[in-house]
Image: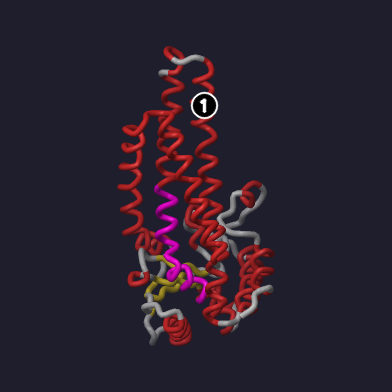
Amino acid sequence: MIKNQIKTVVLLGALTGLLLGAGQFLGGRQGLFIGLFFALVMNFGSYWFSDKIVLAMYRAKEVKKKDSPKLYNIIKEIAEDAQLPMPKVYIIPTENPNAFATGRNPTHAAVAVTHGILGLLNKEELKGVLAHEMAHVKNRDTLIQAVAATIAGVISYLAFFARFAAIFGGGRDRDGGEMFQLLALAILTPIIATIIQLAISRSREYLADETGAKTIKNPEALASALEKLHRGTKRNPLRFGSPATSSLFIVNPFSAKGMMNLMSTHPPMEKRVKKLRGMEI
């Protein structure tokens, strides 16, 4: 767990360093602060309202204890074991077997599961998945992802500015070396920022696996669930929603082939399962 936390800090530091370097090259402090301001405004809105947006996007319906007592009671038990407030509970009308957690903090959290996952997993496997999602809430992953998105957003803004400068202003008052640097900044920095952001997402998935397994003291249940979900999502990929939100789900709900696998927000399933089965509780 400590290793994953340190890795997240290092990756956020690398992302910040990339931002500072790009900002310094383009416009010094003033250009950097302008980009940071706009990115903060956009991500502040995303942090406060993204839960409502994503729940609406996936047609999630809130359920109470009387509607789904088994699901509600499992989440309540996990919340108590993890010393977290009871989140709101939602069900998504799709046969894609999956789940995600959202909300800006533990007191404003929601856990959503699909119809597909309720029919696929046994009670212990479902408990493992829900413990993973509650671990995301406990570990404040929505905040960490918001910080990473803010920094990556500023870098994208600076890259756009660099492309603009290279096209419209570079030829008149910059030599060939500086033109090359501008183009490199415009093309490479967003790619590097995306790779780092994806690495942060994968690191948080490993951490949520570990935290969730320790909460229920049963890593095998989560490992077994992940294997079933991996096969289930291949048979029934999600047909609506946005791939941009795939990092929210416990497994990628969309069909990912070729280069998409290299840019995955999730670690390889085999590695996740191996880590879980190698845990000592």
Estimate the x, y position of residue 71 in percent, counting from the top left.
47, 82
**Residue nearest the viewer, comparing 232 with 174:** 174
Can residue 147 be seen by looking at this rendering? yes
Neighbourhood count class around disc 1 (C-alpha, 10 Å): few under 14, some 14–19, many 20 upward: some
| Quarter of the C terminus within the rendering | bottom right
**Residue nearest the viewer, comparing 235 with 121:** 121
29 shown above or below 57:
above
Estimate the x, y position of residue 225 in percent, counting from the top left.
62, 75
**Residue nearest the viewer, comparing 138 with 43:** 138
129 shown above or below 234:
below
Write down the region rendered in magenta. Answer: 131-150
Q: Is residue 274 left or right of residue 109?
A: right
Is 167 included in the stretch rendered in magenta?
no
> What residue is rendered at 43% in x and 32% in y?
160
Magenta span: predominant SS is helix
Number of numbered discs: 1
Q: In this view, does 246 lie to the left or right of 140?
A: right
Amino acid type, callout 1:
Leu
Element under disc 1: helix
Q: What scheme was used to colour the molecule?
A: secondary structure
> What residue is rendered at 51% in x and 62% in y?
5
Is 143 included in the stretch rendered in magenta?
yes
- Quarter residue 63 falls in: bottom left
- Quarter residue 57 falls in: bottom left
> What residue is rendered at 63% in x and 52% in y?
261
Estimate the x, y position of residue 56 in percent, counting from the top left.
38, 63
Can residue 68 be seen by looking at this rendering? no
- Quarter residue 152 falls in: top left
> Which residue position holds label 1?
183
Estimate the x, y position of residue 21 in percent, counting from the top left.
46, 35
